[in-house]
Amino acid sequence: MKNSIYFFSILLLFCQCGSIKNSSFEQTNEGLKEFYKKYFNIGVAVSVSSVKNKNANLILHEFNSVTAENAMKMGPIHPAENMYNWKDADTIMAFVKNNNLKIRGHNLCWHQQTPKWMFIDSLGKKVSKQILLARLKQHIFEVVGRYKGQVYAWDVVNEAISDAPNEYLRNSEWYQIAGKEYIAKAFEYTHEADPDALLFYNDYNEISATKRAKIIKLITQLKKEGVPINGIGLQGHWAINEPSYAQLDSTLSDFSKLGLMIQITELDISVYPKEHAARERQNIDTATTFSLEKETKQAAVYKYCFELFRKYKKYINSVTFWNISDEHSWLDNFPVKNRKDYPLLFDTNNNRKAAYWEVAKWEK
Ligand code: GLA
């Protein structure tokens, strides 16, 4: 009897140790979304293959929101006037529904990845403003209508501001044919198609004081005209040398005064100094390994970016990374073709990097 009591006590102790070990393992194995649950949603841009392959587990473990990297853009989803390609977007939607995730819609009106047919008639001549706006409306009604009540926020207009210092709006085909009105119209159509969706204007290089002033001017005008807009999307394609802490602080401070919500929509931090224009790879581009120096600098930038996101948590309700891990990033081919970059929080094997821990752990 004494022996069996002894045996059971040992067994109990063993089990308790096991469960303690398990629960502390679970704690350290929490995903980013848990670290940030009192702050904002943590999102990631996904492709149709990533929601089916090994990345699916990582997505579900770390993130609670997704954006389709390409599948909902006008070119892929609406390649010809009477043809919609729903397959990829529907697959991503099913993943979202099955796993109870949030999804941001990206995007409805942009100067890139727009199908050629949108701007021309059957003879190849430019369409009128009236026809272009009717096509835009039809596109928005179809896409937003299909995912109504499921996509909680849309990037309605993407990158309408010009990068040229002396030009306000980008001289895109949208602008050339429809003038500045296409922007307000896109928001109105989207609101009509899904009155509950949150509507965003999304742009990059928002950390530049010049570009930022133009974005703020646009949003202020839209608000004055009573256009339905709920938020500003800051893409956040940044690098190890920019933004500085002060630059990002003033960026977030300026946007927070607009009285709209802010979302960081396409975050990555390149390990190369920022270059804005595409160029060929040259001899100077040989140092492409992820050195300790790059790792340290990148982790430091990620650290203060999230410090500032937390500071502005009253305004920021979502931070989305553009791509999952360093295995694949659009920056592997931009601005320098075929130069490997390492801009994300997970390495090429999906392991957490130094930058991950700078983001996940902080002194509260
Ligand atoms: C922009 C777009 C995104 C994506 C990136 C590059 O930021 O908004 O959809 O195309 O460029 O990958």
Image (cartoon, rainbow, N blue to C red):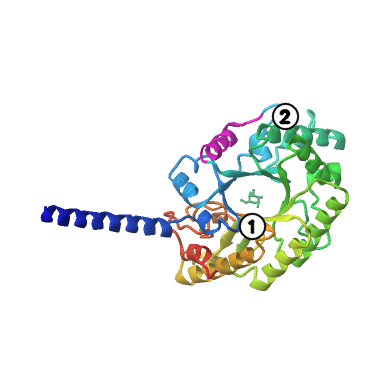
Of residue 212 and residue 239, the one placed in the foreground of this image is 212
Residue 43 sits inside the magenta stretch: no
Which sits earlier in the primary sequence, circle 2 or circle 1?
2
Of residue 10 and residue 223, the one placed in the foreground of this image is 10
Write down the quadrant of residue 24 in the picture.
bottom left
Residue ID at (43%, 45%): 54
Q: Which mark is residue 50?
A: none
Image quadrant holding the C terminus, namely bottom right
The local crowd at label 2, few if under 14, some if 14 to 19, many if 20 or more residues have their Cα within 10 Å, is: few
Residue pointed to by mark 2: 81
- Give the residue furthest to the front: 1
Residue pointed to by mark 1: 278
Q: Amino acid at mark 2?
A: Glu
Question: Please, what secondary structure does the residue beneath circle 1 have?
Answer: loop
- Whether residue 234 is visible here, answered yes or no, is no
Bounds of the magenta segment:
84-99
Q: Main secondary structure of the magenta part?
A: helix
Which dot, 2 or 1, sits closer to the camera?
Answer: 2
Q: Is residue 243 above or below residue 159?
A: below
Of residue 121 and residue 71, the one placed in the foreground of this image is 71
- Whether residue 187 is visible here, answered yes or no, is yes
User: Is 39 on the left or on the right of 187, as rendered?
Assistant: left
User: Is 1 on the left or on the right of 196, as rendered?
Assistant: left
The local crowd at label 1, few if under 14, some if 14 to 19, many if 20 or more residues have their Cα within 10 Å, is: few
Q: Amino acid at mark 1?
A: Ala
